[in-house]
Image: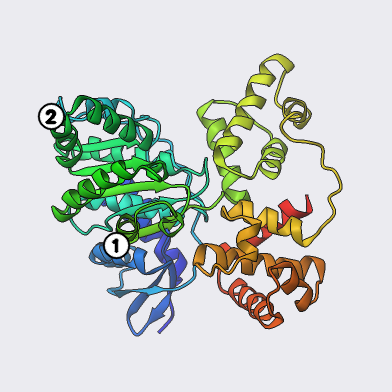
Amino acid sequence: MKQPNVHLLWDKAISLLDGEVSEISLNTWIKPLEPVGVEQGVFILSVPNDFHKTFVDQYASLIKNAIKAAGSADYEVRFQVGPTEPLSHTVRTEKRPPSPTTSDESFGQASLSRLNPQYTFETFVVGSGNRFAHAACVAVAEKQGGRNFNPLFLYGGSGLGKTHLMHAISNFICENYPAKKILYVQCEQFVNEFIYTIKENKYDDFRSKYRNTDMLLIDDIQFIEGKEQMQIEFFHTFNALYETGKNIVLTCDKPPQSLASLEERLRTRFSSGLIVDIQPPDYETRLAILRRHAQQNNVSVPDDVYEYIASNVASNIRELEGAFKTVLYYSMLAGPITQDVAREALKDIIQPSAARKLSASLIMEVVGNAYNVTVDDFKSNRRSKEVALPRQIAMFLCRSLLNMTLPQIGTEFGNRDHTTVMYACSKISEDLAIKPDLVRQIDDLKKRITG
């Protein structure tokens, strides 16, 4: 029997599914699937990870029907977890921003008014560094109160999109589940309200506000570190929500295990759900973000200007957007946007590329900045995942870019044994053969290191 063209068949199936499921579900769960082949009447689709498979299972019958309609063959559908390239980076701009409302006008109205209506899932640019975080947030927004990954704990450096995703969850629920009570606050506001509660002795009001909600979202939870009374109150608030099946979403600049001055009982609760890190955007994602901003501002920008900005502003999305706005406003005075105009506009932001001497210290600094860890972390005995992987990558780059010996690398990384370095380099080499996202990350790091 002649094998079908699975890619053509899958493209047709996706077009048929457009309209059968929501745009967010289509883009988040279905489009990232990759056709592998057909075996004994089974159409096999590759999914990125177990988390993705858990949620795409619910669409199996719809996908089966779409494939049948697209190719007139009645295949069973099987999802296979394995490395896969995404079909495309997703830039979404069509959907009209929602107007947050709640059925209880007195409840949390101030928090809802703080939502940015532009921060939606449709306007979030998905790339390799944030794909898992985006999928997790969509899952929580769509399935709140049901299958919950509770709490959802997002962590990463400043300006990587954590707040955008928090607002996107809130905006999605306000629009699609207006009867739900949600409360989004920045941790600073939470702390200030608690201080006011102590001063005015209004504990009942405070507890009623934060415990009678269907979902509590707190941004920058690290600010409760060192505040003992605040931690005690939040511990009881957390338990009250968790035990009644309410969702909790938290963001932080570090993983729970690194919150050294947080009570152990809170740290373990933060670690009990789904912990997702957000990495700095890779080169392709930065280009997609810049193009989205040009589209939103209805301006035409040459490709070499996108490439210039994306190549030189790599630390976070906020700085990238700031650089683009600077070029845009400068062009209003200087004329059409060109690379020369961009260079002039950003001359105080992007320094001329000085010849940088490659060294192990430089590699550790660049890799550390990308993964939100310090050079001291690389040299320490910490073996947690958030340190171990960047350390292995840095060792691999020292080997491949500097041709250092294994003992030399071991010395630079806290006097480690050469066998440890050998294992790190071998592991990264093996992973590069099967993990396309890692290939992009390391290519991006090489560009930053070599200038």
Q: Is residue 13 left or right of residue 449?
A: left
User: Which label number is shown at residue 104?
Assistant: 2
**Residue at 36% across / 75% down in the picture?**
43
Q: Position of residue 392 (x, y in %)?
A: 63, 69
The residue lying toward the viewer, choosing from 338 and 389, is: 389
In the rendered structure, which amino acid carries the disc numbered 1? Phe
**Residue at 58% across / 74% down in the picture?**
431
Q: CA distance from mark 2 to mark 1?
A: 31 Å
Q: Residues within 10 Å of mark 1 (few under 14, many from 20)?
A: some
User: Which label number is shown at residue 55?
Assistant: 1
Q: Is residue 372 left or right of residue 422?
A: left
One can see residue 121 in this view: no
Q: Position of residue 312 (x, y in %)?
A: 71, 42
Q: Is residue 376 left or right of residue 203?
A: right
Q: Position of residue 90 (x, y in %)?
A: 47, 48
The residue lying toward the viewer, choosing from 51 and 393, is: 393
